[in-house]
Image: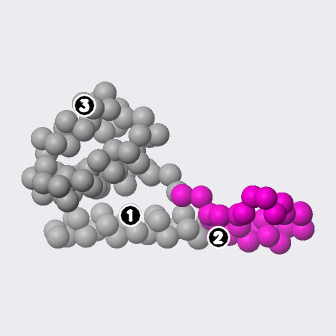
Amino acid sequence: MSRMSDMAQTIEDLRSAAAAISDAADWLTKMFSGEPQTEDAPISPSEPELTLEQVRAVLADKSRQGHTAEIRALLQKYGASKLSQIDPTHYKELLAEAEVLTNGS
């Protein structure tokens, strides 16, 4: 991996860790707030939302691996010519499809 790719991965890992710590703090606050918990709905940390920067880092890495045309096709599939035009609700699906590029190509 290149230094920029390593740095992007490190930044993504730090953001994920920060989100996990925040989720744990929220869970602890709920557990010790004195409010009764319902047994029907188990408390589980929610999955942190992906940011534009996280998605951009992954797609840039895929592009450096030689998948630039495929990345452009994915963006067009989601109705955009650039990543910033894509609705953030589609980031998870977009990344899932981008991951296949490395494994399947």
Of labels 1 and 2, the one closer to you: 2
Numbered disc 3: secondary structure:
helix
Mark 3 and mark 2 lie on one chain; the one further toward the N terminus is 2
Disc 1 designates what residue?
12
- Report whether 28 appears left or right of 61: right
Q: Nearer the viewer, residue 40 or 28?
A: 40
Q: Which mark is residue 76?
A: 3
Residue at the far front: name it: 40
At 78% from the left and 65% from the top, the residue drawn is 30
Q: Residues within 10 Å of mark 2 (few under 14, many from 20)?
A: some
Task: Residue under label 2, please give it.
Answer: 24
Is residue 64 at all visible to an observer of this figure?
Answer: no
Write the start and end of the magenta stretch as one range. 23-47
Taking the magenta stretch, the answer to whether it contains residue 33 is: yes
Q: Quadrant of the C terminus?
A: bottom left
Q: Which secondary structure type mostly characterizes the magenta part of the structure? A: loop
The image's mark for residue 74 is none
Q: Is residue 33 left or right of residue 27?
A: right
Provide the secondary structure element on which disc 2 rests: helix
Was residue 86 drawn as part of the magenta stretch in this picture? no
Query: Decide: marks 3, 2 in contact (CB < 8 A)?
Result: no
State the CA–CA distance, disc 3 to disc 1: 25 Å
